[in-house]
Image: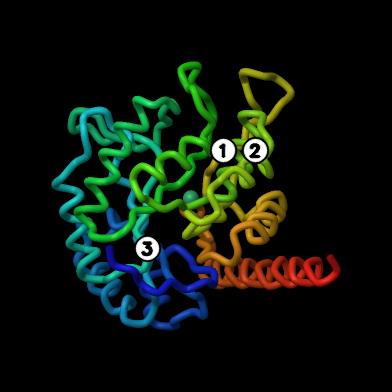
Amino acid sequence: MTSIRKPVTAGIGLRLPHIVEVVATRPPVGWLEIHPENFLANPHAMELLIELSEHYPISVHTVGISVGSVDGIDRTHLRRVCALVDRIQPFLVSGHLAWSTYRNEYLNDLLPVPYTSETLRLIETHMKEVQDALGQHYLIENPSSYVGFRASTMSEADFLSELVSRSNCRLLCDISNVVVSAHNMGYDALEYISHLPVDAIDQLHLGGFTAEPDEAFPGTDVLIDTHAAAIAESSWDLYAFAIRRFGSKPTLIEWDNEIPDLATLTDESLKADQIVTKALSTEASCANTR
Ligand SMILES: [Fe+2]
């Protein structure tokens, strides 16, 4: 598999409302992330993306490759993504631990899978198919969770670790998804981060979430992974903890709804870089005093 040099600073999502401004102003961010599905049927946006790919490292984050689907992945869509990857040579390609298609129907959601050995076998097969087609590693992202399956026989972190060792895939750890899932599912976010395989983490995400009253449990809130708000303090705190464990990793500021102006995104990416510097210097000074 090819290995492409990765930036270690923060990047932002290249969303259609900003693309002309990004081309014109070239904001000071480490890299750009795209959803290929936004560009495949938009020739003008694709032209601008190809121009930007000469100036920024690009990360491709798929939302349409459904590795958790029981009836297989959409090979036509996979071929389209591979053609785009060949054109822009991204430093990473990633997707979700989820399913979103069934019998040629595309559902506008990333739906959960039970963590069982049967699911492992299914996703392992699909991951190998995707990585063989891409000719590079595929990163799988931990989901934001709202419900669990009684059928699950292992924790999410153990499931991801086993998937890494079976399929030789890599991991994208969405820090805010860990905050959301830990709150909603009632587990310890620090413990979750501590159980992920350090050597497999290639990218991090930080996104905003929204608290809503939980109708099932009156008086409590459920956190919804809306990507429609600034990054919460709890996510920044967990990010600093994760950086001390994983080291500096390319980190995406993920904001997909109620998208703010470009300067706000750039400021969030600079904040992420500052937190990395502080977390690693604190770690170094602690090591020196041990
Ligand atoms: Fe994410």
Q: Residue at x 22, y 61 (%)?
A: 42
Q: In the rendered view, tell whether residue 224 sits above or below residue 276.
A: above
Q: Residues within 10 Å of mark 1 (few under 14, many from 20)?
A: some
Q: Residue extending furthest right?
A: 289
- Residue 246 position in % (x across, y down): 59, 59
Q: Quadrant of residue 206?
A: bottom right
Q: Which label's residue is closer to the chain start, 1 or 2?
A: 2
As measured in the structure, the alpha-carbon distance from the residue carrying label 3 to the one carrying label 1 is: 26 Å
Point out which mark residue 3 bears. none
Quarter in which the N terminus is drawn: bottom left
- Residue 174 position in % (x across, y down): 53, 50
Point out which mark residue 211 bears. 2
Q: Amino acid at mark 2?
A: Ala
Of residues 142 and 1, which is closer to you in this image? Answer: 1
As measured in the structure, the alpha-carbon distance from the residue carrying label 1 to the one carrying label 2 is: 6 Å
Q: Quadrant of residue 266?
A: bottom right
Of residues 264 and 88, which is closer to you in this image? Answer: 88
Q: Is residue 129 left or right of residue 290?
A: left
Q: Which label's residue is closer to the chain start, 3 or 1?
A: 3
Q: Amino acid at mark 1?
A: Ile
Residues marked 3 and 1 touching at CB (< 8 Å): no
Point out which mark residue 224 bears. 1
Residue topped by disc 3: 92
Q: In the rendered view, tell whether residue 192 sits above or below residue 270.
A: above
Q: Which label's residue is closer to the chain start, 2 or 3?
A: 3
- Residue 84 position in % (x across, y down): 22, 63
Residues marked 1 and 2 touching at CB (< 8 Å): yes
Q: Give the SS element for disc 3.
A: strand
Q: Amino acid at mark 3?
A: Leu
